[in-house]
Amino acid sequence: MAVNPPREPGRIRRYLREHTFVRHVLTLMSGTAVAQVLPMITTPIITRLFTATEYGSWAVVMSVASAVIPLAALRYDLAILLVEDRRRATQLVWLCSWINAGVAITTTLVMIALAPWVADLYELDRSASSWLYAVGLIIWAFGQMAIFTYWLTRNQRFSLISRNKIYQSVTVAGTQVGLGLGGIGVFGLIAGTLLGQLSALTNLWRKGGIPERVPLTKTDAKSLLKEFRKMPLLNGPNAVVDSIRLQGINLLIGAVATTAVLGQFTAAWALVQAPAALVSSALAQVFFQRLASTKPGHMFAMVRKSLLITMSIAIVPFMLIYFLAPPLLPLLLGGGDKWANAALFASALTPWLYMNFSTSPISNLFVVAQRQEILLGFAVVYMAVPLSIIWFNRTDMVATIQMVSWAMAGLLACFCVIALLVARSYDSRAPNELV
């Protein structure tokens, strides 16, 4: 009896098998797609369950936490991808975990003193202000997730990262809608966000996504801290500046306007960023791993190709958002004028978010090329411009955000040029290293 030979894999399957970079990006995108689609589906429900003021109060609490989250491991977590020896990489994961716990505890002690002042400044109700005392726990959960995600990226376990994003998104959306139906106000928004992180960490533990514990002596810790001291010294300031910019924009809008206006801005940011995050976060994660292994002589071509691809695939979706958000978004969020400003904010933000999407995959180039000082200089300007515009233009916040958006898009265009110059400089090392 003749046995039919096995069929040759299809063209797409064969292509993905031969091109691991594309396969990894698509794997992460699949999880990111579901993780982004779920909030978009539940947003029309959430905007009917919570007011703009409650949404803004949630943004204040999360902005305070998010200002510290990038520094939770003092940037040593970036080095997890760079350590060649697996045992030392595992030690670094647990060293970062100890640092994260210390930062979370310190933040909790600081917030005991600052929470009443923050609550008064933004006129937070008791439900929201009580969460200011739990900011340290929020920081720990997000920081630990970032540490373990770098570990999984190092080991190219992109499928687990993708599935875990879905798990987290389902938990957050389900909890927020469920608690919102109970009519408990902003507590439901914040509790859902925290529970999503904690459940995702539990899921990683169940799925074997957390590395084994290895002995970590004081000598080992000192050696790792010394070897990668450039991470906090050079990347730390960048993270501080970025946190001041990102969270400062939110907190400044809430301070010079109202928490209701901040709620409208936050809703717009989340909705417009969703299609961008669908691709850019996956590209950035995989591209960082590729950048870390790229030899001098090939970096410029890789960076140029990345920019051309991302700018090309993003232009049509962002043009549609720019023109269609004002008439369609209010209907999606609940009808009437309740969320009208959110639609105007969404349209205003598109130039900035388009360029942010296009440049996100190459943002880690400066870490790999050891040129963090250039990134820091750019980050300072990138921080000062939007905060200055908002501070000096308080009357019409929609017009102000439009001004901020175009200014930031122009700065990111300059960032592209700087990145290409750094990549060319990195490639110039090739002849010496090949000798």
Image: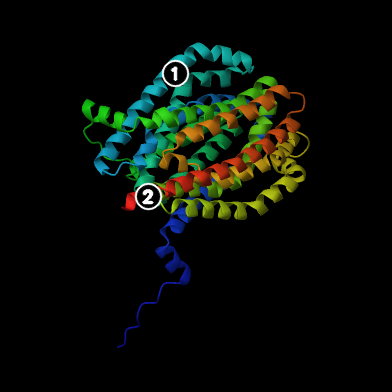
Q: Depth check: 239 or 279 in front?
A: 239
Q: Is residue 162 visible in the rendered structure shown here?
A: no
- In the picture, the quarter occupied by the N terminus is bottom left
Colouring: rainbow
- x, y percentage for residue 392? 71, 22
Q: Which mark is residue 225?
A: none
Q: Secondary structure at mark 1?
A: helix
Q: Residue at x 49, y 39 (%)?
A: 171
Left or right, residue 144 beside residue 192? left
Which amino acid type is marked by label 1? Answer: Thr
Between marks 1 and 2 in the image, the one whose residue lies nearer the viewer = 2
Left or right, residue 432 beside residue 421? left
Q: Is residue 358 shown above or below 125?
A: below
Q: Is residue 67 visible in the rendered structure shown here?
A: yes
Q: Residue at x 57, y 21 (%)?
A: 128
- x, y percentage for residue 151? 35, 42
Q: Is residue 238 shown above or below 205?
A: above
Q: Is residue 110 shown above or below 216?
A: above
Indicate the quadrant where residue 327 lies.
Answer: top right
- Disc 1: which residue: 108
Q: Secondary structure at mark 2?
A: loop
Few, some or many C-alpha atoms within 10 Å of disc 2 (few <14, some 14-19, many ≥20)? few
Q: Which mark is residue 293?
A: 2
Left or right, residue 229 beside residue 13? left
Which amino acid type is marked by label 2? Answer: Ser
Of all residues, the one furthest to the bottom in this rendering is 1
Q: Residue at x 66, y 20 (%)?
A: 255
Disc 1 to disc 2, C-alpha distance:
38 Å
- x, y percentage for residue 173? 55, 39
